[in-house]
Image: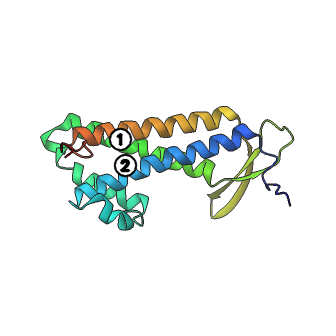
Amino acid sequence: MSYTSPYSFLPDEHMRLVGIIAFHWEAVDLSLQRAVAEITMTDCGGIAILTDMIGFRSKTEIIMAYARQFQSGDPLKWKEFVSALEGVKDAYTLRNKFVHARWIDGPDTTRPLRVDFRLSGGRLKQEEVPTEIGELYAAATAIFNAGGAMTTCLWKCGLMLPSQETPA
């Protein structure tokens, strides 16, 4: 018995990059979960089941509430933090755009069509958008970079630092 994917029309490179986008996003989301656990002063392993169930917007609100202490005390750190969090929000949008896309076969085998749905004027509009491999590559890179910027910013705020314990 053989299996044929319903997405067999997608070039391998597209499918690979959709997987990379999902992987990079999971790394970003795990960082957000760890930051929430540290902010709430809870053991990361013990709270993982809860932080996994917290939605993205709620995680970013908790982290922003924590960072607000830097708004007047350290405006430069606050500005960097807001910028990093905006980058993560943009990364979330990119991840959803490609990972949750409905893909259909297009006239050009190197540019499959991504079906976008938009609300405009109270109407749902569907648009078939040819998607270049470069778009997926740019999205994967942007998500990776946003995660790195957020992690660096969290380190500067005293979160997610490596353990200072020495092995026994």
Quadrant where the image shows the N terminus: bottom right
Camera-side mark, 1 or 2: 2
Q: Which residue in the protein does label 1 denote?
A: 150
Q: Position of residue 4 (x, y in %)?
A: 83, 55
Residue at position x 27%, y 38% in the image: 79
Could you tell which of marks 1 and 2 lies nearer the N-terminus? 2
* Amino acid at the residue labelled 2: Ser
Find the residue positioned furthest to the left.
Answer: 73
Spatial CA distance of label 1 from label 2 is 8 Å
Residue at position x 30%, y 52% in the image: 35
Find the residue positioned furthest to the front.
Answer: 168
* Amino acid at the residue labelled 1: Met
Q: Is residue 123 above or below residue 99?
A: below
Residue at position x 70%, y 40% in the image: 14
Whether residues under marks 1 and 2 lie with C-beta atoms below 8 angstroms apart, the answer is: yes
Packing grade of label 2 (10 A; few <14, some 14-19, many >=20) is some
Q: Nearer the viewer, residue 121 or 80?
A: 80
Q: Position of residue 106 (x, y in %)?
A: 83, 44
Residue at position x 42%, y 67% in the image: 53
- Place residue 39 in its image quadrant: bottom left
Task: Count all numbered tags in the image, as a single digit.
Answer: 2
In the displayed structure image, the side of residue 18 where residue 4 appears, left or right: right
Packing grade of label 1 (10 A; few <14, some 14-19, many >=20) is many
Name the element at disc 2.
Answer: helix
Q: Position of residue 94 (x, y in %)?
A: 55, 45
What label does residue 27 carry, if any? none
Q: Position of residue 157 (x, y in %)?
A: 21, 42
What label does residue 31 carry, if any? 2
Q: Is residue 41 above or below residue 166?
A: below
In the displayed structure image, the side of residue 145 where residue 62 appears, left or right: left
Q: Nearer the viewer, residue 161 or 140?
A: 161
